Image (cartoon, rainbow, N blue to C red):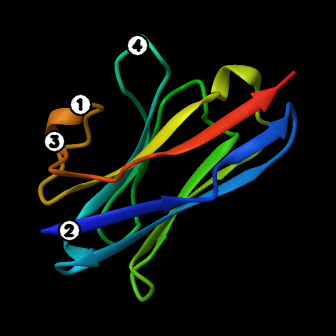
Amino acid sequence: QVQLVESGGGLVQAGDSLRLSCAASGRTFSSYAMAWFRQVPGKERAFVAAISRRGGTTYYVDSVQGRFTISRDNAKNTVYLQMNSLKPQDTAVYYCAAAGTYYGTRSQSEFEYWGQGTQVTVSS
């Protein structure tokens, strides 16, 4: 079992930055690839970014490439999502997820463990 707890969400203006954190507890954090997804009301949860177990490989959805950076600190059992140049369309609940085996896809089905989410609201 892995427990994930997100933090760092909030209300910001367009162009601002936020850093989300996801603290993991339970089994060995470095055994899991980690990802961030986001969801708006009425839509399916969508892939944002992912990072390999040791942090050497990252994946991004096109809409955040160049603005968001995913990183991890295995010593602190934490994964981060640095979000810069935020846009109103980035408004969503952001979820952290963990995968024991990750094939580099954007599919939710690869991820076994999920946090409860943190709200990010970007005003125009």
Q: Residues within 10 Å of mark 4 (few under 14, many from 20)?
A: few
Name the residue type under label 3.
Glu
Helix, strand or loop under label 1: loop
Q: Amino acid at mark 1?
A: Ser
Question: Which sits earlier in the primary sequence, circle 2 or circle 4?
Answer: 2
- Looking at the picture, how far across and down is residue 104, in whole percent? 26, 42
Figure quadrant of residue 26 = bottom left
Q: Position of residue 57 (x, y in %)?
A: 39, 57
Residue drawn at x 52%, y 64% is: 71
Q: Earlier in the sequence, mark 3 or mark 2?
A: 2
Mark 3: secondary structure:
helix
Of the residues under marks 3 and 4, which one precedes in the sequence?
Answer: 4
- Residue designated by label 1: 107
Q: Secondary structure at mark 2?
A: strand
Q: Identify the image quadrant of the N terminus.
A: bottom left
Residue beneath label 2, please?
Answer: 2
- On screen, residue 92 versus residue 82, left or right, reads left
**C-alpha separation, residue under disc 3 versus residue under disc 4:** 19 Å
* Nearer the observer, 111 or 66: 111
- Residue occupied by mark 4: 43
Cα separation between marks 1 and 4: 15 Å
Label 3 with label 4: CB-CB less than 8 Å: no
Dot placed on the residue nearer the N-terminal end, 1 or 2 = 2
Q: Is the C-beta separation of discs 1 and 2 under 8 Å?
A: no
Residue at 34% across / 18% down in the picture? 44
- Mark 1 touches mark 3? (CB < 8 Å): yes
Q: Amino acid at mark 2?
A: Val
Q: Nearer the viewer, mark 1 or mark 2?
A: 2
